[in-house]
Image: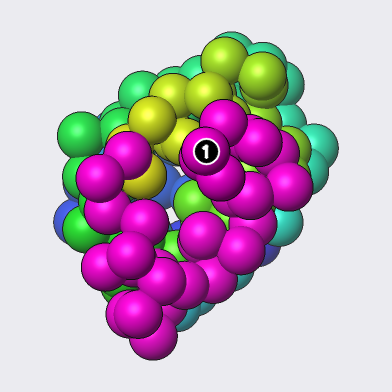
Amino acid sequence: MKRSRDDHVFEGDFHLTLPIVSEYADQFGSRFIQQKLETVTTEEKDMVFNEIMPQAYSLMTNVFGEYVLQKFFEHGSATQIRELAEQLTGHVLTLSLQMYGCRVIQKAFPHDSSLAA
């Protein structure tokens, strides 16, 4: 799979040229990232994670971005999962009532029992 848009490059081997955050809000970019998060190297996963963190809350309520965050709850490192869970602090009720945010909350709870307290 090869895909180019503006300054973004996606190839089958998960070569990324930053910035790519706008791709998470795009259906095809989101699906591509979701699939790749299951098999990429730690370095590549860290690169994507570091880019999404400043926009994590807004991605939680995005129709396509929320899927990328769910994948990080499934395939992220313990540190990445903890950092994402910390983004939920103070927003659990709001996200739970939001169409897409509620899905992120559902993924987060099995991974971070401290959120239930």
**Amino acid type, residue under disc 1 in the picture:** Ala
Q: Is residue 50 above or below residue 105?
A: above
In the rendered image, is residue 25 in sight? no
Residue linked to disc 1: 117
Q: Position of residue 87 (x, y in %)?
A: 33, 37
Q: Quadrant of residue 98?
A: bottom left
- Which residue corresponds to the image point at 26% horizontal and 68% vertical from the top-left? 94
Q: Position of residue 11 (x, y in %)?
A: 58, 48
Numbered range of the magenta stretch: 89-117
- In the rendered view, does 64 fall on the left or right side of 74? left
Q: Quadrant of residue 2?
A: bottom right
CA neighbours of label 1 inside 10 A, class few (<14), some (14 to 19), many (20+): few
The secondary element bearing badge 1 is classed as: loop
Q: Is residue 38 above or below residue 6?
A: above
- In the rendered view, does 85 fall on the left or right side of 58? right
Q: Position of residue 79 (x, y in %)?
A: 57, 15
